[in-house]
Amino acid sequence: MSNHAFMVIVSAVFLMIVVSIATKSPKLVPRGLQNLVESVCVFIREELARPMLGHHTDTYVGFLWTTFFFILTLNLVAMIPTEKIFGLITHRPSHIGARRRRTSSSRAPWASSRSS
């Protein structure tokens, strides 16, 4: 499993936990995390989806909310330098994005072994 697939799974689990906590005990006047989630959901439904979808809004709004929060969570997780953190924990250097050092004895794989 690649790091990207692992982070997608971690993000999905994190999102399920946060949303279930936010909607655990709905109140008439929401506070805290519930207020944040409800405000974003109302904004997406009323200001983005309803003008474009019209009377079909209630059919597709659940999909739009899920997609929005999933992409938002993935973007926020992408800002965390996980490669560096894993390198600090495992004491192994991260080579992602680094150039490979060439020594005088190393040859390119496409170079022929015959000298001309």
Image: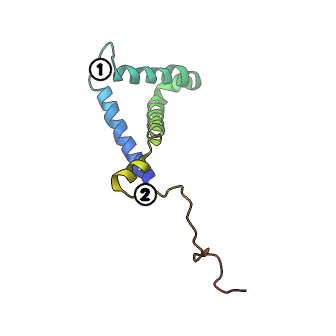
**Left-right relation of 42 to 16:** right
Disc 1/disc 2 C-alpha distance (Å): 46 Å
Question: At x 33% / y 17%, what residue is drawn?
Answer: 31
Q: Amino acid at mark 2?
A: Pro
Q: Would you say 85 lies left or right of 53 here?
A: left
Tell which of 105 and 81 is nearer to you: 105
**Above or below 104: residue 114:** below
Q: Which residue is mark 1?
A: 26
Residue at the (44%, 45%) spot, across then down = 81
Q: Are marks 1 and 2 in contact (CB under 8 Å)?
A: no
Total marks drawn?
A: 2
Query: Which residue sits at x=31%, y=35%?
Result: 17
Quarter of the figure that contains the C terminus: bottom right
Report the colour scheme. Answer: rainbow
Provide the residue designation for mark 2.
93
The amino acid beneath tag 1 is Pro
Q: Residues within 10 Å of mark 1 (few under 14, many from 20)?
A: few
Position in image of residue 100 (x %, y %): 55, 64
Instruction: Determine whether, in the image, residue 86 is placed left or right of residue 59.
Output: left
Please tell me which residue lies in front, 37 or 99: 99
**Observer-nearest residue: 21 or 99?**
99
